[in-house]
Image: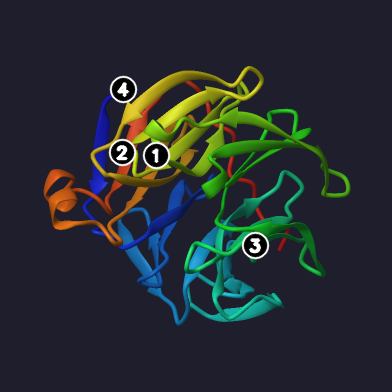
């Protein structure tokens, strides 16, 4: 599969891609530079680290900021805090997305990437509850096509965990390890799923995206990315068969930047599968 550079953004920490089906728009963020992009255009710069976002049914975006969930109007850039999180000062929101019922699921992490002080929250627009705790770097989230399984990555574990998922209540149960990632791949980061039930995972330090069968733990495909710190993925496009890939430049050595000069870029790959949709927030 041929990989295409869409934008040489030189993002410090490109992350959180989300596809708006209604407007056919890709949104993504540069966490450390506090920027929100709409495709290849800079949409806004905000006042805090922004780890993730998702489209809302009313045309707005919900943002996972450092320690809060915020309603963002992409036309006026007006922000309204919807929920505040009780998190240590050294933590921030990292990856997140909406579940099939429209809840915003987002995890936090220790900014020093060492202490298991992070959590995963579920926000339905009214109340926030904690789904997981003792997380170090909360990352990839995805659902199976029947919505009955939730997949999750805490990056330092090098594992993808699966949980039974109750869409009606948002409860998770029966955690088990479904994929164990060899060290040679790098660190598992952002993740998405396709309508066949396979997982597509970006590998930080691995310069690749890999496709896995979570039912067997089998590696199915590898896509080389010309960015060492490949960070996240999402399906989009008219037929939802285009895989958008974010990447980062933070803390890269001069030697690695010379080897991977497009690190921090936004990429696209045309696949032969249909991806799962980016679910909208119920607002």
Mark 2: which secondary structure? Answer: loop
Q: Is residue 178 left or right of residue 171?
A: left
Can the viewer see residue 22 in this picture?
A: no
Q: Which residue is mark 3?
A: 58
Could you classify mark 2 by the number of other residues whose Cα lies within 10 Å: few (under 14), some (14-19), or many (20 or more)? many
Could you classify mark 1 by the number of other residues whose Cα lies within 10 Å: few (under 14), some (14-19), or many (20 or more)? many
N-term mark: 1 or 2: 1
The residues tagged by marks 3 and 1 sit, at their Cα atoms, a distance apart of 38 Å
Q: Which residue is mark 2?
A: 207
Mark 3: which secondary structure? Answer: loop
The residues tagged by marks 3 and 4 sit, at their Cα atoms, a distance apart of 36 Å
When the figure is inspected, residue 147 is found, relative to residue 49, above or below; the finding is above
- Extreme right residue here? 169
Q: Which residue is mark 1?
A: 186
N-term mark: 3 or 1: 3
The image quarter in which residue 248 lies: bottom left
The image quarter in which residue 185 lies: top left
Q: Which residue is mark 4?
A: 1
Mark 1: which secondary structure? Answer: loop
The residues tagged by marks 1 and 4 sit, at their Cα atoms, a distance apart of 21 Å
The reply to whether the C-beta atoms of the residues labelled 4 and 2 are less than 8 Å apart is no
The reply to whether the C-beta atoms of the residues labelled 2 and 3 are less than 8 Å apart is no
When the figure is inspected, residue 206 is found, relative to residue 92, above or below; the finding is above
How many numbered discs sit on the rendered protein? 4
Residue at image position (59%, 34%) is: 276
Q: Is residue 185 left or right of residue 191?
A: left
When the figure is inspected, residue 240 is found, relative to residue 82, above or below; the finding is above
Residue 136 spot, x, y in % from top left: 58, 58
Kindly report which numbered mark, 1 or 4, lies closer to the viewer in this rendering. 1
On the rendered image, what quadrant is the C terminus found in?
bottom right
Could you classify mark 4 by the number of other residues whose Cα lies within 10 Å: few (under 14), some (14-19), or many (20 or more)? few
């Amino acid at each position: 599969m041929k990989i295409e550079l869409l934008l040489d953004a030189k993002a410090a920490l490109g992350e959180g891609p989300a596809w708006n089906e209604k407007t056919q728009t890709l949104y993504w963020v540069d966490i450390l530079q506090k920027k929100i992009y709409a495709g290849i255009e800079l949409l806004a710069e905000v006042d805090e680290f922004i780890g993730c976002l998702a489209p809302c049914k009313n045309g707005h975006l919900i943002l996972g900021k450092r320690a809060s969930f915020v309603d963002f109007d992409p036309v006026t850039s007006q922000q309204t805090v919807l929920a505040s999180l009780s998190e240590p000062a050294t933590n921030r929101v990292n990856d997140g997305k909406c579940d099939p019922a429209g809840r915003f699921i987002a995890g936090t992490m220790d900014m020093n990437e060492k202490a298991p002080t992070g959590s995963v929250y579920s926000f339905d627009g009214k109340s926030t509850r904690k789904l997981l705790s003792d997380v170090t770097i909360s990352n990839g989230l995805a659902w199976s096509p029947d919505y009955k399984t939730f997949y999750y990555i805490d990056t330092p574990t090098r594992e993808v965990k699966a949980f039974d998922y109750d869409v009606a209540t948002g409860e998770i149960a029966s955690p088990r390890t479904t994929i164990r990632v060899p060290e040679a791949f790098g660190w598992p980061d952002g993740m998405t799923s396709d309508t066949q039930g396979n997982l597509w995972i970006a590998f930080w330090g691995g310069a690749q995206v890999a496709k896995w069968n979570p039912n067997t733990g089998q590696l199915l495909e590898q896509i080389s990315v010309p960015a060492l710190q490949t960070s996240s993925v999402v399906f989009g496009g008219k037929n939802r068969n285009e895989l958008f890939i974010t990447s980062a430049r933070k803390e890269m050595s001069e030697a690695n930047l010379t080897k991977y000069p497009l690190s921090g870029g936004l990429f696209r790959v045309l696949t032969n599968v249909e991806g799962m949709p980016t679910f909208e927030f119920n607002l």
